[in-house]
Image (tube, coloured by chain):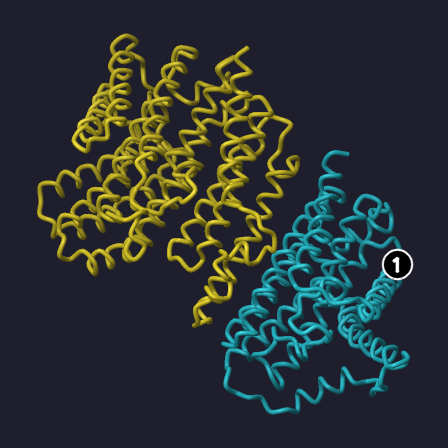
Chain colours: A cyan, B yellow
């Protein structure tokens, strides 16, 4: 029962975060007032919109990526092995990137190449992080890691690993200096060339998949904090919201600079922590 | 020796003699039948756990070894590859002097696969039979007007089966040397069939020189091992070789890697990519993946006695193989050969697992940060290769203009790093360090 509650709570929390972001953004001076529920409203309008229907593969890739996102979410809330969750998320990425290649559009393929670059970084970071986790905790199961974080203060051994995984979340959301997007301002699927093959309901499904994936990463990060599960999840969500807002004040960088920064902050930090655990 | 092992080695040889004497039309039938029989013998070997004794005088293997070396010698003289002639003449001299002066006793059972080795033989048989239909199809398509090449393929294939069975089943150093030479001859024949002639990527002569040089060292190592332990059987090497343990282990390790084609950068550039991918895949899966693992596993009793530094360096070398295989595959993801580089990547993992659970403080992956990071990088590049390979089926425009002349790796990783140079330096550095540590143990 708690798993089902967590499943829906995490799935719904990310749209709530985006609604909160939208509201705070709209009350800032100089910003136009928008409808508070705009992120959800746009999603629902997409489901109503008729699809172009000229790219059949788009349906397959969008549905497949959403399915894998849901599987990853279930595994994350159930406390499965961290590497299992990562492998399912990598399958999701495979479908999204391959879908962008299938679009036949130049911007889609360029965006797919950049996403593949991001994929290499986050997968490498995750695997090194899992090696560090196993070295420190003796297990990769998320529920056991959460218990060890609560009882043994596991975080003291893997602080850089936590930072690297948080940077992965920022990369996935195209925030701060880790923005790999082709068009810089949106934090949703709209305007991102990676999702150019999709329209109508397939684009809505992709948006859902992206939100669910964000929820998965928030849940993973929450297991490292030495507090109870609901509080740790709330803390990580608030931190994510803070970075969403901070992103408005950070200037855009070109994608190669973003990739280099990602290598340094995500991959580099996870490697540092792993070597530290090995030698000390 | 074990009867089933004898059948697995000798039946392909009998078919080879038939093929040499018969017309090329029977090549396809003979290759198919020999492949099926090989699988059948493997399954029967599983069904009969204890060896069925079949006495074969050890003189026979000595004579065959000498005959093989002399065949390669005369062939090299004919091809004007005089470096090979020198190396094989040294080998012949060692064989003659050693056999005449020492009359060393071979193990009671010259060829016998244990349970793990039977599994490897079964895996090899399945691989061969899986690839064979595609190989025959391409032969019929591209070489129907070249009967000589078809017959050569048949001879090479039969030698492949014999040498594979012999390498996995061998119990002595003599057996490994003999069947490695048969593997060398099989590879030479495949090159004659599938080699691309007259182009800049034509076969590099240095590589067979390297293989024969390494086999010469291996033969010498066998003689030294006999002098130190009084036996040629690997199972009798459990006390090691004293001060020479590291050096001899290094020779064995390098022999397994170089005969498995796990050293050069370009791996298999000299085979015609439009025709040879299934045949190259079959050869590599057997001799680059299964055989190095099987042969190195025979020497685990020797590796138990090694200095931790040497084991660590061998594990690092294996990690380099994992990274290198996936890097070369990703760099050439549009090339049909790219998937064959994955075999080198997996071979690296297979070689590294030989050192798992040895009696040393070094444990594969968990206590070694550097090979762990290389293996992770290799797995990540493999995943990227899969995505690029699948995506290339959907993208129907030329992507060369998009990457501006960069290869796939440098377009994905935004640093100007010459990975190819780093891999070469890593190979050389690890090999040099391993040699240095080995020689330092002679003091």
Residue at 35% over, 30% down:
B210
SS type, badge 1: loop
Q: Is residue B354 visible?
A: yes
In the displayed structure, does residue B263 sit left or right of residue B178? right
In the displayed structure, does residue B423 sit left or right of residue B178? right
Q: Chain of mark 1?
A: A
Q: In which quadrant is the N terminus of chain B drawn? A: top left
Residue at 83% over, 79% down:
A22
Q: In which quadrant is the C terminus of chain B drawn? A: top right
Q: Which residue is mark 1?
A: A228
In the displayed structure, does residue B18 sit left or right of residue A110? left
Instruction: Give the answer, above or below, for where B410 lies relative to A24.
Output: above
What x and y, as percent, mark residue B15?
A: 17, 41
What x and y, as percent, mark residue B280?
A: 33, 49
Front residue of this view, candidates B280 and B434 = B434
How many labels were placed on the picture?
1
- Mark 1 is surrounded, within 10 Å at the Cα level, by few (under 14), some (14 to 19) or many (20 or more) other residues, namely some
Instruction: Give the answer, above or below, for where B29 lies relative to B428.
Output: below
Instruction: Give the answer, above or below, for where B72 lies relative to B237.
Output: below
Residue at 53% over, 69% down:
A98
What x and y, as percent, mark residue A163?
A: 78, 53
What x and y, as percent, mark residue B125?
A: 33, 46
Residue B11 quadrant:
top left
């Amino acid at each position: 029962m708690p798993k089902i509650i967590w499943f829906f709570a995490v799935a719904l929390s990310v749209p709530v975060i985006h609604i909160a972001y939208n509201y705070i953004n709209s009350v800032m001076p100089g910003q136009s007032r928008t409808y508070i529920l705009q992120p959800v409203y746009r999603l629902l309008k997409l489901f109503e919109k008729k699809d172009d229907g000229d790219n059949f593969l788009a349906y397959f890739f969008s549905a497949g990526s959403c399915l894998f996102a849901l599987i990853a979410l279930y595994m994350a809330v159930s406390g499965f092995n961290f590497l299992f969750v990562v492998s399912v998320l990598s399958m999701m990425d495979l479908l999204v990137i391959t879908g962008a290649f299938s679009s036949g559009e130049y911007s889609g393929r360029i965006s797919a190449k950049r996403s593949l670059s991001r994929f290499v970084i986050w997968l490498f970071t995750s695997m090194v992080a899992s090696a560090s986790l196993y070295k420190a905790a003796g297990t990769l199961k998320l529920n056991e890691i959460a218990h060890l974080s609560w009882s043994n203060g596991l975080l003291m051994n893997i602080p850089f690993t936590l930072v690297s995984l948080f940077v992965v979340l920022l990369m996935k959301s195209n925030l701060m200096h880790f923005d790999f997007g082709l068009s810089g301002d949106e934090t949703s699927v709209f305007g991102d060339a990676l999702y150019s093959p999709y329209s109508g309901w397939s684009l809505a499904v992709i948006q859902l998949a992206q939100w669910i994936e964000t929820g998965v990463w928030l849940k993973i990060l929450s297991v490292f904090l030495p507090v109870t599960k609901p509080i740790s999840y709330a803390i990580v969500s608030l931190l994510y919201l803070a970075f969403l807002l901070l992103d408005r004040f950070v200037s855009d960088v070109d994608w190669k600079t973003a990739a280099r920064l990602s290598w340094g902050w995500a991959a580099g930090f996870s490697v540092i922590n792993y070597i530290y655990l090995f030698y000390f | 020796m074990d009867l089933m092992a004898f059948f697995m080695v000798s039946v392909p040889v009998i078919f080879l003699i038939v093929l040499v004497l018969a017309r090329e039309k029977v090549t396809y039938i003979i290759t198919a039948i020999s492949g099926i029989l090989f699988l059948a013998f493997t399954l029967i070997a599983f069904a009969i756990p204890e060896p069925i004794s079949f006495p074969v005088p050890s003189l026979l293997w000595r004579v065959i070894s000498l005959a093989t070396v002399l065949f390669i010698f005369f062939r090299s003289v004919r091809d004007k590859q005089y470096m090979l002639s020198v190396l094989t003449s040294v080998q012949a001299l060692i064989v003659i002097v050693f056999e005449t002066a020492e009359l060393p006793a071979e193990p009671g059972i010259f060829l016998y696969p244990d349970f793990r080795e039977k599994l490897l033989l079964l895996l090899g048989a399945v691989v061969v039979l899986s690839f064979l239909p595609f190989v025959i199809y391409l032969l019929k398509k591209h070489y129907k007007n070249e009967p000589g090449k078809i017959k050569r393929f048949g001879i090479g294939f039969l030698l492949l089966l014999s040498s594979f069975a012999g390498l996995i089943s061998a119990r002595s150093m003599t057996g490994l040397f003999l069947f490695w030479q048969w593997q060398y001859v099989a590879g030479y024949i495949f090159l004659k069939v599938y080699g691309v002639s007259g182009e800049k990527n034509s076969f590099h002569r240095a590589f067979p020189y390297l293989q024969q040089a390494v086999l010469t060292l291996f033969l010498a190592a066998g003689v030294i091992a006999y002098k130190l332990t009084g036996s040629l059987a690997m199972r009798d090497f459990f006390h090691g070789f004293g001060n020479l343990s590291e050096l001899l282990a290094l020779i064995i390790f390098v022999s397994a890697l170089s005969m498995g084609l796990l050293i050069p950068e370009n791996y298999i550039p000299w085979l015609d990519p439009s025709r040879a991918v299934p045949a190259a895949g079959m050869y590599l899966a057997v001799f680059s993946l299964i055989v190095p693992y099987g042969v190195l596993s025979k020497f685990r009793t020797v590796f138990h006695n090694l200095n931790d530094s040497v084991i660590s360096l061998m594990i690092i070398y294996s990690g380099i193989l994992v990274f290198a295989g996936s890097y070369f595959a990703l760099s050439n993801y549009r090339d049909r050969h790219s998937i064959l580089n994955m075999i080198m990547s997996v071979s690296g993992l297979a070689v590294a697992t030989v050192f798992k659970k040895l009696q040393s403080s070094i444990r594969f992956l968990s206590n070694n940060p550097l090979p762990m990071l290389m293996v992770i990088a290799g797995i990540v590049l493999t995943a990227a290769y899969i995505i690029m390979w699948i995506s290339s089926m959907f993208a129907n425009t030329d992507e060369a203009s998009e990457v501006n002349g960069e290869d796939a790796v440098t377009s994905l990783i935004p640093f100007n790093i010459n990975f190819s140079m780093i891999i070469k330096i890593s190979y050389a550095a690890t090999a040099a360090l391993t040699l240095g540590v080995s020689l330092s143990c002679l003091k």
